[in-house]
Image (cartoon, rainbow, N blue to C red):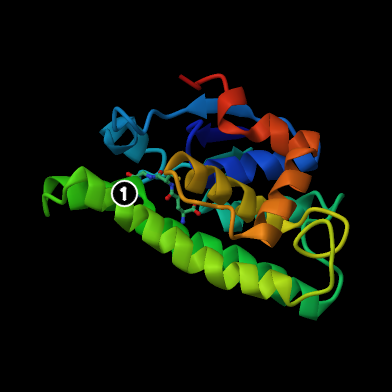
Amino acid sequence: MILYTYFRSSAAFRVRIALNLKGLTAEMRPINLLTKENRLAEYRTVNPQGFVPYLIDGELRLAQSLAIIEYLDETRPNPPLLPATPAERAFVRGVATLIACDIHPLNNTRVLDYLDSVLHVEKDQRSLWYQHWINEGFTVLEQLLAARPASTFCTGEAPSLADICLVPQVFNAQRFKVDVAPYRRIMAIFEACMKVPAFDAAQPSRQPDAT
Ligand SMILES: N[C@@H](CCC(=O)N[C@@H](CS)C(=O)NCC(=O)O)C(=O)O
């Protein structure tokens, strides 16, 4: 397998965690989002959308982190990344999409670039924007998690797709100086995940392209 990645990309971080949890290795091909390598024609011929992650598995080419992770889970089922029951699977997918669809896209590089270069939003206001969408999403996520029976991970005692999405989003929150202290459940789960080698090894600072 080949994974197009960038050390700071939280969507690529999700896929790196999933690969590690399943004990899979992929050749890492870094695409530098800072220098906008992802927008060059060369990378657009790989992924026309110009995003990372992008996975090549033999003849198969896949975009979109959640689709990639579900593909890995269906083709390499152990350990499972989705729970056994429909109700818990729906909960996990709900957490994953709250993060991946309702928080993360608002703070994507292209959105921040648009705020900056087209709307000429001041740097401080751009940070407020970033923090606002995380705080709004984390407030709801915290309530969802706190209303459930105590568990080490988002659901039960094994990491799932929900945790795979939660951890990179916490990294983003910390990088952009969001006060995460009020999110006690989220942070307890984050700390538990970071003790798992598969999560630790996938973190940005451990990637070969980290600067
Ligand atoms: N929905 C996509 C989002 C992927 C995404 O937003 N990737 C970011 C890095 S985290 C990216 O490549 N951004 C490039 C850009 O905004 O130009 C997924 O889950 O894979």
In the picture, measured across the screen, residue 83 lies left or right of residue 50, that is right
Question: The disc labelled 1 sits on which kind of residue?
Answer: Ser
Q: Quadrant of the C terminus?
A: top left
Callout 1 secondary element? helix
Q: Is residue 165 above or below residue 204?
A: below
The crowd level at tag 1 (other Cα within 10 Å; few <14, some 14-19, many 20+) is: some
Q: Residue at x 78, y 63 (%)?
A: 82
Q: Using the image as rendered, state which of residue 122 and residue 158 is in the foreground.
A: 122
Residue 198 seen from this side: yes
Q: Where, by quadrant of the figure, is residue 98 drawn?
A: bottom right
Q: Is residue 70 visible?
A: no
Q: Circle 1 sits on which residue?
A: 127
Q: Position of residue 168 (x, y in %)?
A: 57, 46
**142 w.r.t. 195: above or below:** below
Horizontal side of 26 relative to 24 (left or right) equals: left
State the image coordinates of residue 177 (x, y, percent, origin top left): 44, 44
